[in-house]
């Protein structure tokens, strides 16, 4: 699957579902996990390393590492490899469910 197709048919519907119901943790998790895998699709399509693909994505979307780490922390108990994350030690235990979704500026009640 082409990266653009992956974004269109997998990521965007999940993001829209989360936007429509921003307090639903399962929708947030699905959206970040799908986005976190985008580097794999880009790397395969361009025949480049995942590291190079991540660098290309960060040039357009600087928060990609955070999204990717949140996705990985939702799949693994703890992120431990500093080669793969800027947040070694980040864990599923750091993910908290708040009272409500953030406002558009990222603040909470």
Image (tube, grey):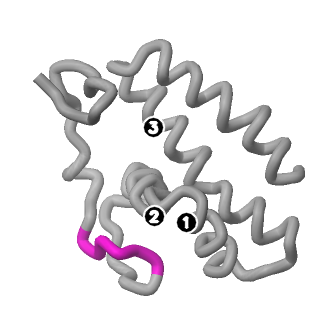
Which mark sits nearer the N-terminus, 2 or 1? Answer: 1
For residue 53, above or below residue 16 = below
Measured along the vertical axis of the image, is residue 17 above or below residue 89?
above
Q: CA distance from mark 3 to mark 2?
A: 15 Å
Q: Please check the rendered image and state whether residue 88 is part of the magenta-colored stretch, yes or no.
A: yes
Dot 3: few (<14), some (14–19), or many (≥20) neighbours within 10 Å? some
Residue at 67% of width from left, 32% of height from top? Answer: 12
Q: Quadrant of the C terminus?
A: top left
Q: Residue at x 54, y 56 (%)?
A: 61
Residue furthest out toward the top: 20
Q: Position of residue 92 (x, y in %)?
A: 29, 52
Determine the image quadrant of residue 103: top left
The reply to whether residue 75 is visible in this rendering is no
- Mark in front: 3 vs 2: 2
Q: Residue at x 33, y 77 (%)?
A: 80
| Residue bearing mark 3 | 29
Q: Which mark is residue 58?
A: 1
Up/down of 22 relative to 61, above or below? above
Camera-side mark, 2 or 1: 1
Q: Secondary structure at mark 3?
A: helix
Which segment did they paint magenta? 84-89
Q: Residues within 10 Å of mark 1 (few under 14, many from 20)?
A: few
């Amino acid at each position: 699957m082409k990266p653009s197709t992956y974004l269109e048919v997998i990521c965007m519907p999940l993001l829209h579902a989360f936007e429509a119901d921003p307090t639903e943790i399962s929708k947030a998790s699905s959206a970040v996990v799908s986005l976190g895998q985008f580097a794999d699709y880009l790397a395969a399509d361009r025949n480049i390393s995942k590291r190079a693909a991540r660098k290309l994505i960060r040039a357009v979307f600087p928060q990609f590492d955070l999204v990717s780490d949140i996705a990985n922390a939702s799949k693994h108990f703890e992120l431990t490899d500093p080669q793969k994350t800027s947040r070694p030690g980040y864990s599923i235990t750091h993910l908290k469910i708040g009272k409500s979704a953030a406002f558009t500026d990222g603040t909470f009640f």
